[in-house]
Image (cartoon, rainbow, N blue to C red):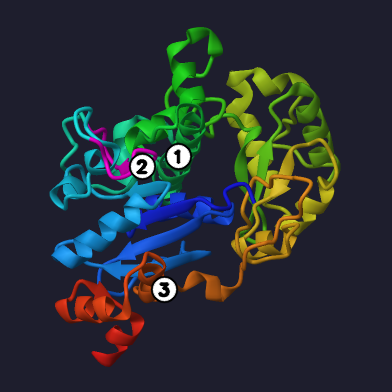
């Protein structure tokens, strides 16, 4: 696999950091999650990873961590600015500071924070909805008040995925220069970059994207031909026929699927109604009334294998059954096709569970520590193992 042989140290965190590590693990990297001793983890983004529970606040634990990171290719830091420096594990320790050498000058040190490091919010707590709010993107989303799409945009797209991309770019640069890099990723800036198309559209009047107030525009629910409609059974159909040819296929198929006498108080849409904004309220009412006459699966069959750009809104279970992998679990993507076959990772439910400290001894023995050292570190509280945690229950 593309990242086979790459050693990654991922400090345990929430959502974006683990997702960045998951992307690397799914593509062959050896990822070791660093957990705190005597704690449990609710992380479900742990497929293909190992867990070592090490306490950096105890000298022997800190020394082991420094040795571990010194042997790694990548470190993922999910903490607020300054935390790793206070632990004596900041980037200068490993990459050097220009006057003294570091412990691992080939290290890719990836930092994943919520707010820009030089901004006024850098020391504040926050979550996806807050980063989305400060990015300017939440203000563009439709609804009586802006509706946020779970925690997908900032945590995972603008955060974890962007961080993983930064790591890959830094690895390419290391291949040229031989030197490690600091990857500085924050979720506010990542979300803004992810949203380049709509944000740039608002800055360029000729794009037409800023016509009208929020909720009345082409792609935010204002256009009747780019929207979601409720069917008779309470489920939904998505409609996205932006181009005239697709709109024709949709509106003609829609009309044929309804009773011949169906109208909106005597009105039926013409093809010219698509970009006549004065007609949009009537067109939306016409489509709303029509979709409500039949269940979702009826409409799905009407538009199946057509160019109408009208498709059913599937539940997560329906979507899993339809996926080409036949797996209920999201499959790593994109797929890199090569001459050598790739062994798929375990996608079963057992891949969602990784106990804190499950591989502590294995990881540290590979690093060269002896059993006597590990036993002493356990007594000091510098490391934790599953066996040690179970003995305290």
Q: In the displayed structure, would residue 289 be above or below residue 329?
A: above
> Residue tagged by mark 1?
167
Q: Is residue 376 visible?
A: yes
- Numbered badge on residue 212: none
- Closest to the observer: 101 or 121? 101
Q: Is residue 284 left or right of residue 64?
A: right
The number of callouts visible is 3
Q: Which mark is residue 362?
A: 3
Disc 2 from disc 1: Cα separation: 7 Å
Question: Disc 2 designates what residue?
Answer: 110
Give coordinates of residue 327: x percent, y percent: 68, 65
Q: Is tag 2's residue or tag 1's residue first in the polypeptide sequence?
A: 2
At 67% across and 39% down in the image, what residue appears? 239
Judged from this view, the residue extending furthest toward the top is 206
The Cα atoms of the two marked residues, 3 and 1, are separated by 26 Å
Quarter in which the C terminus is drawn: bottom left
> Residue at coordinates 21% horizontally, 49% vertically from top-left?
84
Q: Earlier in the sequence, mark 3 or mark 1?
A: 1
Percent coordinates x, y for residue 138 in the rendering: 37, 36
Q: Nearer the viewer, residue 229 or 110?
A: 110
Kindly indicate whether the residue at mark 1 contacts the one at mark 2 (C-beta within 8 angstroms).
Answer: yes
Q: Which residues are magenta?
A: 101-117
- Identify the element where label 1 is drawn: helix
Question: Above or below — where is 115 with respect to 384?
Answer: above
- Quarter of the rendering containing residue 255: top right
């Amino acid at each position: 696999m593309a990242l086979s042989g790459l050693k990654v140290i991922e400090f345990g965190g929430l959502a974006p950091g683990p997702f960045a590590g998951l992307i690397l693990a799914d593509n062959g990297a050896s990822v070791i999650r660093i957990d705190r001793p005597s704690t449990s983890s609710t992380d479900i983004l742990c497929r293909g990873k190992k867990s070592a529970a090490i306490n950096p606040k105890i000298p022997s634990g800190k020394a082991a961590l420094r040795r571990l990171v010194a042997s790694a290719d990548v470190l993922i830091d999910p903490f607020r600015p300054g935390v790793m420096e206070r632990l004596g594990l900041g980037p200068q320790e490993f990459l050097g500071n220009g006057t003294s050498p570091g412990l691992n000058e080939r290290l890719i040190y990836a930092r994943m924070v919520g707010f820009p490091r030089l901004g006024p919010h850098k020391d504040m707590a926050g979550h996806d909805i807050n980063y989305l709010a400060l990015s300017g993107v939440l203000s563009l989303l439709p609804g009586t008040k802006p509706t946020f799409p779970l925690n997908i945009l900032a945590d995972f797209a603008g955060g974890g995925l962007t961080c993983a991309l930064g790591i890959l770019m830094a690895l390419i640069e290391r291949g040229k220069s031989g030197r490690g890099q600091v990857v500085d990723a924050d979720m506010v800036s990542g979300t803004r970059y992810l949203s380049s198309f709509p944000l740039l559209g608002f800055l360029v009047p000729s794009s037409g994207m800023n016509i009208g107030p929020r909720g009345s525009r082409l792609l935010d629910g204002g256009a009747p031909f780019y929207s979601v409609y409720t069917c008779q059974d309470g489920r939904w159909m998505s409609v996205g026929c932006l181009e005239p040819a697709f709109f024709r296929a949709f509106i003609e198929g829609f009309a044929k699927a309804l009773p011949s006498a169906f109208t909106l108080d005597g009105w039926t849409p013409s093809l010219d109604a698509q970009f006549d904004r004065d007609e949009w309220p009537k067109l939306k009412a016409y489509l709303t009334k029509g979709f409500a006459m039949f269940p979702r699966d009826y409409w799905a069959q009407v538009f199946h294998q057509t160019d109408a750009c009208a498709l059913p809104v599937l539940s997560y279970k329906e979507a899993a059954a339809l996926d080409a992998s036949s797996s209920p679990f999201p499959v790593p993507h994109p797929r890199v096709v090569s001459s050598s076959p790739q062994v798929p990772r375990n996608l079963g439910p057992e891949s969602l569970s990784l106990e804190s400290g499950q591989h502590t001894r294995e990881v540290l023995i590979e690093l060269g520590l002896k059993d006597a050292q590990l036993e002493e570190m356990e007594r000091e509280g510098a490391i934790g193992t599953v066996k040690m945690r179970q003995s305290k229950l």
